[in-house]
Image (tube, rainbow, N blue to C red):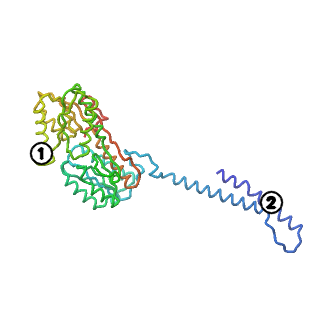
Amino acid sequence: MAAMLVFGGCGNKTADRVTENQTHKTENESNEPVEKEPAEDEDELKEENQEEQNTQDQETDVEEEEEKAEIPEESTLDINYTSVDGLRMEKGSRISVVIKNTESDYWKAAKKGMEQAVSDLNEYLGYKGDDAITCTIEGPKDENGVDEQVNILDMVLTENPVVVCLSAVDMSSCEAQLEAAQEDGIPVVMLDSGVKSDDDLVYAYCGTDNKAAGEEAAKQLCEAIGDAGEVAVMSHTQLSQSSKDRVEGFQEEITKNHPNVSVVSVDYQPSKDDDPTEEESIEAVLEKYPDLKGYYATNQATGEAVLSVLDKHADRSVQMIGVDMGDTQKKAIEDGKEVGSVCQNPYGMGYATIVAGARASLGLESDKKIDSGFQWIDKNTIGLEEYARYLY
């Protein structure tokens, strides 16, 4: 509006000056044709016309900028892994997820988070039917299925999804597949458990800070046994990065800060047919260390195994702490058979993984490490509503 007022204020004065100049020449000059010199007033008119045009151009530019500002560019948005806002994926995009196993409560909870994120994307973008974004979630039936998972990943890559989200059973098993994905322009987001590979092959990692989770478990177990005595560890597969980190975090915390506590045994789930079962390993530890004060289990399956064996040795009063929270652990905590558990956030991890995958497919930046968090839960906090999603 201000620019338009300026334009109107100078137009009539210019026209008056031009008319007077032309009249003066008619009265004082002869009838012979003469070549006119450019009038000063004509130069002023040109300048004012040019000024008006420049102002109109500026006004048009402002209007165009305002129109663009109505739809923010995704790259300027704050990264929020709990929201799909701003992620304008193409119609019919397919996300492929390959997890460690499809049977545990933990992974069922993670799957719910992923499915909710995909549903939110479709609702946000208004995609339905054939236009809808889809997500396949596959994996072996247990966490020892290294070859099965590699075969699934090979098949997934041939289907050319816009992004692959992978939780590796074996941190050393997928190098060739990651390289193939990079060659084909398919970004990879790791979740829950990473791999031993060049960071350039992985767009982002989303999961628990597993060393910190191990440290928290050590603090809680040491407190439960009076900060003195022998403790043992039963961990899930030794091939997994998450298992490795949870054991290391536990051991480092005890070594640094609990001089009167000693870790006398670390065992793992069987990886070969002739390996002892979890229960057999736990029984052997209880027999070898009659004064054992505490047990640390690094996931749901090993936690259930420790509880099963300790039920047979109720007279031993061994304090047990786990990671994750299925129905068995929940009841054990309520009954006083388990001190508590370091509970991951699988639902939130699943949701954040899909958000990171969507960002990867769009060529947007994300944090290299996305911490989905954990929560210590014991008999005093297990009934709190705000912790419900940690109980999977």
Residue 382 shows up from this direction? no
User: Which mark identifies residue 154?
Assistant: none
Residue 362 placed where, x, y %? 40, 55
Residue 331 placed where, x, y %? 19, 34
Query: Measured along the vertical axis of the image, is residue 31 above or below residue 213?
Result: below
Q: Is residue 152 left or right of residue 360?
A: left
Judged from this view, the residue extending furthest toward the top is 226
Location of mark 2 (residue): 17
Element on which disc 1 rests: loop
Which amino acid type is marked by label 1? Asp
Which amino acid type is marked by label 2? Arg
Residue 166 placed where, x, y %? 28, 51
Residue 70 shows up from this direction? yes
Res 28 quadrant in image: bottom right
Quadrant location of the C terminus in the rendered image? top left
Location of mark 1 (residue): 275
Task: Please rate how many residues cluster around mark 1, counting C-alpha atoms within 10 Å: few if below 14, some from 14 to 19, many from 20.
Answer: few
Which one is in front, 117 or 145?
A: 145
Residue 230 placed where, x, y %? 18, 30
Q: Give the number of the mark in front: 2 or 1.
A: 1
Q: Is residue 275 left or right of residue 77?
A: left
The residue located at (28%, 53%) in the rendering is 97
